[in-house]
Amino acid sequence: MQKIVVFTGAGVSAESGIKTFRDHDGLWENHKISEVATPDAWRHNPKLVLDFYNERRKQLLSAKPNQAHKLIAQLQGKYDVHVITQNIDDLHEKAGSKKVIHLHGELMKCRSTLNPNLIYTLKSWKLNIGDKCELGSQLRPHVVWFGEAVPNMEIAYEVASKADVFIVVGSSLTVYPAAGLVNFVSNNSKKYLIDPSDINIQDVENLIIYKEKASSGMEKLASELL
């Protein structure tokens, strides 16, 4: 069975109403990234950070997978499909994708500030000051903030290197190290890029570009692959 690796960015969830700060002049829901998505922000104002991610969770609970998510999941009927996503939402899983690697963490999870390996699934959208892990330390969002290492990156490189088909959906390929994934894919593998923006990609062999939004681009590509 051929292996398809799908690398997704914010564009794949935008059609489900999940907003991305990169569409708003560096602001994310009217907050500067430095105020809500950095280790310094957590140290200086943890309540603001928790409130911010609580609102993101509340938004996510009402969001549903769109056609792009569903079509990516449908590829599993014919291929061994691995999804590598920059997104912290769980829409790929809700659509039915079984093998999902989250590079930047998962919104519906939290973790210990004392031991990062203590990770918990949240039962509601609220995470508050005073919510602690079993070691007695404050819980924080299980997301990778700017300035932090991306722990799943090496796993993603390994998965990408074995792809027979590599599909990029809704990513501008500008956020590193994730954007460098395509460089680990074999030159002989087929590559597809689905994104409506003008992206300048050079030195990538066997690349076909669909200059479309995620859903319409995936519809065209799925009709070819299925």
Image: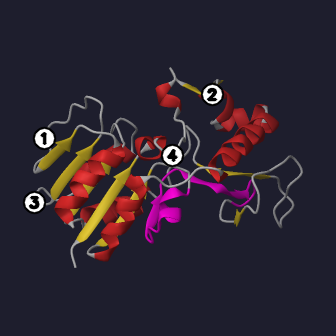
Q: Residue at x 25, y 71 (%)?
A: 3
The mark that comes first in sequence, 3 or 1, is: 3
Q: Residue at x 14, y 60 (%)?
A: 189
- The residue at which mark 2 appears reads as 34
Q: CA distance from mark 4 to mark 2?
A: 26 Å
Q: Which residue is situated farthest in the right direction here?
A: 130
- The residue at which mark 4 appears reads as 16
The mark that comes first in sequence, 3 or 2, is: 2
Helix, strand or loop at disc 2?
helix
Placement of 13 over or under 29, stated as above or below: below
Helix, strand or loop at disc 3?
loop
| Residue 111 occupies quadrant | bottom right
Q: CA distance from mark 4 to mark 1?
A: 33 Å
| Residue 35 occupies quadrant | top right
- CB atoms of marks 3 and 4 within 8 Å: no
- The residue at which mark 3 appears reads as 188
Q: Residue at x 45, y 52 (%)?
A: 66
Q: Residue at x 27, y 39 (%)?
A: 212
The mark that comes first in sequence, 4 or 2, is: 4
Q: Looking at the image, what colour scheme do you see?
A: secondary structure
The x, y position of residue 36, in whole percent, is: 67, 33
Image quarter of the C terminus: bottom left
- CB atoms of marks 1 and 2 within 8 Å: no
- The residue at which mark 1 appears reads as 203
